[in-house]
Amino acid sequence: MFSNEIADDLKGLEPGAAVDVRSSTGARIGRGYVNPRSLIAVRLLTRDRHDIDAVPFWALRLREALRARGRACPGRHSLRLVHAEGDGLPGLVVDRYGDTLAVQLTTAGAEVRRDVIAAALQEVFQPTGAVLRSEGRARQLEGLEDERGAWFGDVPDTVDIQEHGVTFRVDLMSGQKTGHFYDQADNRAHFGRLATGLRVLDVYAHSAGWALQALACGATEALVVDKSAAACELCVDNLERNGFEERSAVVQAEGRKFLIELTSAQERFGAVNLDPPAFAKTRKTAGSALRGYEDINTLGLGLVEQGGLFATSTCSFHVEDERFEEAIRKAARAAHRRLRLIRKSTAAPDHPVRLGVPETRYLKHYLFQVELDA
């Protein structure tokens, strides 16, 4: 609930305090927590009368999230366990890596209940330990400072996980976000299955996930690109860990610049994947972000062989589906390529979408077969 939708003066309330919400007619709407310093002034947790300051409420929601994962992701142990508003727990993100949890507390309401949340996490998930990765713009907007480090229990610096038959090394303390991007897991696996026998280019690679899945399914070779030295080290480690070092190469370079270099060298690939970070952090920057997406997609499409595969994604919520598709169409025209859509998807099911909260559907992924425009 945004601050301009609330009649009462919130200035005297402490950030994170529990509040009951009623309509202008006095009808009960529910209970949540408040932050008078934030544009999102109230986040609703329940329409019932649960005590949101007590462990039983959080444990109840965590059990619901765990049951949902059992149905949607049977057999997966390492995955996202709690997806904030997607699981009815705004401000809380929990990823499980083996027996260790990586936790983000992104709101004042979650922050002031950290001890309650810790107790509920231990009761329901019984981890050996948990690390806090409470960082980023969301906390800044809530008036909170970043925090990173071991939270409770025994926390290793790194842990190995399995994803669709591929082994990944996850850096719990220094990796991006919580250490691994689970949201693209199913999309990576589908891309890999179709890349059998192809030469693959994986740009904005982070952990080489797209290349790894492709190589595991029989891709002939993979070129992996990321501008971060730490990410490139992780890519090399993951490729060696899976025995693919002889069929792969890792290059540290900025994605767009390297795409230009490959174009100048007249390189061609059977499959190209672009999975950049969010270009649009706010609605105001969506226009410039779309121009950026059109640019890199034009370059990427120009590198695909006749009949090859092209995968492209955006994790920018503020870039709407229709506008992203239009950017891809413009890129295809500029690259003189005809596109046949194979797959259009969003995040894996351990990132549930709540229809009343469109922000939970932030990821857009497209996979095409590419032909020259005769």
Image: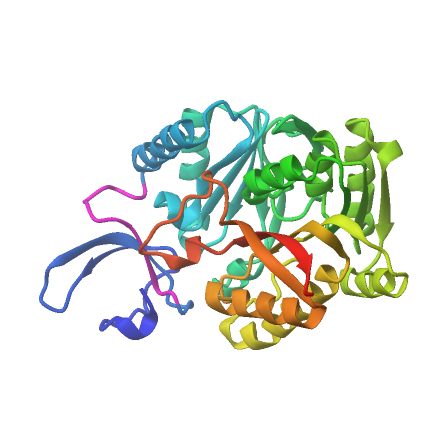
Residue 33 at least partly seen: yes
Q: Is residue 233 left or right of residue 120?
A: right
At 41% across and 27% down in the image, what residue appears?
70
Residue 231 among magenta residues: no
Q: Position of residue 27 (x, y in %)?
A: 10, 59
Q: Is residue 261 left or right of residue 160?
A: right
Residue 42 among magenta residues: yes
Q: Main secondary structure of the magenta part?
A: loop
Q: Quadrant of the C terminus?
A: bottom right
Give the magenta-colored segment's residue range: 40-53
- Residue situated furthest front in the rendering: 374
Q: Position of residue 200 (x, y in %)?
A: 76, 45
Please tell me which residue lies in front, 184 or 38. 184
Q: Is residue 45 left or right of residue 25?
A: right
> Is residue 42 shown above or below 99?
below
Quarter of the view holding residue 295: bottom right
